[in-house]
Amino acid sequence: MNTEPQAIAEACAEVLWSHDRASKKLGISVENIAPGYAELSMTVADDMVNGHSICHGGFMFTLADSTFAFACNTYNQNCVAQHCTISYLAPAFKGDRLLATATEVSRHGRNGIYDISIVKQDNKKIVEFRGFSRTIAGTLLPDANPTMSTDSHN
Amino acid sequence: MNTEPQAIAEACAEVLWSHDRASKKLGISVENIAPGYAELSMTVADDMVNGHSICHGGFMFTLADSTFAFACNTYNQNCVAQHCTISYLAPAFKGDRLLATATEVSRHGRNGIYDISIVKQDNKKIVEFRGFSRTIAGTLLPDANPTMSTDSHN
Amino acid sequence: MNTEPQAIAEACAEVLWSHDRASKKLGISVENIAPGYAELSMTVADDMVNGHSICHGGFMFTLADSTFAFACNTYNQNCVAQHCTISYLAPAFKGDRLLATATEVSRHGRNGIYDISIVKQDNKKIVEFRGFSRTIAGTLLPDANPTMSTDSHN
Amino acid sequence: MNTEPQAIAEACAEVLWSHDRASKKLGISVENIAPGYAELSMTVADDMVNGHSICHGGFMFTLADSTFAFACNTYNQNCVAQHCTISYLAPAFKGDRLLATATEVSRHGRNGIYDISIVKQDNKKIVEFRGFSRTIAGTLLPDANPTMSTDSHN
């Protein structure tokens, strides 16, 4: 197994993606991955909008939340969302292409904080999201050394 | 027009529902509506889960967010989400029936705070959500007296 | 040791209070304690206000935060704040008597959620606060049975 | 009146400081000001700690909140906190020198989002705070042209 951080981050994203039916259902794409970092994109589809063609907040949340999950799971240590906050700055409309970028604010013990911004195709920011993560037992990648416990970081 | 608060709340919910393709797409049902109050339900479908049959947080958020929208729009005054926080207490799995209940914590000026809890069929609480709303211009129902401005509460 | 929950809650509050120089410095009083519940009061002093006699948000936060700490530490298990949110609904002025009430929303594993409201003497709500706690090793009360580990809930 | 943005920001900070008895009471100093930016420092005093010499969260919140207020009030338009979130990453102890830095994440309409980090003298981050502001009527500086209304941005 390539143990270089960038290679681990990309391998983790592949595992995460292979299980993520929800993100696929919404047409989400993974654009970029690095340790503690992720970029995902989504186009606002017909059935994501209300009668005024405004995207439902739940789909913008889901894009941000998936981006958060990809960013916090780049260290080959299972990591889950505990708590998230989302602020809506401006609406998105049918056909808008949304790009979500997750950056790492802090990792302290088993806790992490990640900020996710969503911008539209014209680079206007429409969502600011902050996610609080916590590592749990287990790794994403098959263990190179199967005699090691995967619970040691609990 | 019946101007009794309960009748207004129910009429507003009908208008909101008629536009809400996103909630329909997810199989959400409106169970109960009252002024400042809403109950919506959703069953976790096959395509809402990851490889471990755990429901993606985005769908639980969307259920909570829709319940929030129905509760804060019961006064015939257009009201939008500004900011939301969600805390995940326990996972939901494929086939779980989720019931979300929104109660009003505060209305002050144009701002509102609503708490939304999601419980599973066994009454176990899995999500605690707090939504911050703001009224905007316009009403949901056609004006009974068309000479009145709909912008007076701006 | 009286192991009745109300007696434990009151004994924990006494221990917490004996260490809490900050709350004393601000003239905070403990009004009521029960398992998962606390009421604390504070009067807005001259040096808590700005030039317009409006109380600085930091002092309202401190009152809410102390009330949160008293409520989440009523089970004789050390418990700390991880994350808090505060919303300001209306201002407080010099001389206002503030009453903060903490109620328990959820306890799940080592995590807890508590809601704290602050009202003024006229019962008007001015602050809505939500606190997220986490238990840590150790108890507040001296162990009745010194052979038991205090670390078992880690 | 010097209408250069940096000069306006500094003049606003002087007005804010002249009214801020609470920050002075806690020994807070203003270190740097720029448009949408502020740095404030505070040393953890004897009466800010509990029996274990750990700084009460309320004082760290107050430092962050004051830094937020100085940053969002650099445009000569009165601006107030609506909602804040604080996450505690690590404790501070008696004698620690804390430096809080506020940066602007977004301004959209009358709303703003600011992130405030607090680090200790060894540059270790101990607090991550996010503040949501809203502009209100009035300016901080005396109007150069007194015939203009100060309510025009409501």
Image (tube, coloured by chain):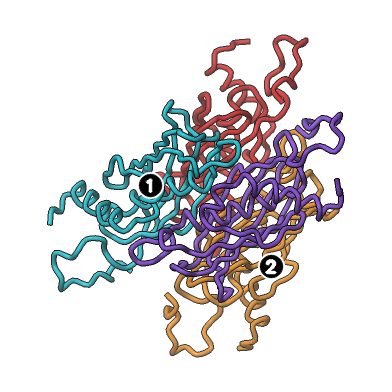
Chain colours: A red, B orange, C purple, D cyan
Q: Secondary structure at mark 2?
A: strand
Q: Residue at x 26, y 44 (%)?
A: D34
Where is residue B102 drawn, in percent x and y? Answer: 67, 64
Where is residue C14 drawn, in percent x and y? Answer: 70, 50
| Tags 2 and 1 on a common chain | no
Say few, some or many: other residues with alpha carbon within 10 Å of mark 1 (under 14 / 14 to 19 / 20 or more): many
Vertical placement of residue C36 versus A132, above or below: below
**Mark 2–mark 1 CB contact (< 8 Å):** no
- Tell me how many marks there are: 2
Where is residue A89 drawn, in percent x and y? Answer: 44, 54
Q: Secondary structure at mark 1?
A: helix
Question: Residue type at mark 1?
Answer: Thr
Say few, some or many: other residues with alpha carbon within 10 Å of mark 2 (under 14 / 14 to 19 / 20 or more): many
- The residue tagged 2 is B38
Q: CA distance from mark 2 to mark 1?
A: 39 Å
Quarter of the image for residue C28 reads bottom right
Name the quadrant of the N terminus of chain A.
Answer: top right
Name the quadrant of the C terminus of chain A.
Answer: top right
**Residue B22 seen in the figure:** no
Q: Nearer the viewer, residue D9 or B41?
A: D9
Question: Residue type at mark 2?
Answer: Ala
Q: Which mark is residue A17?
A: none
- The residue tagged 1 is D67
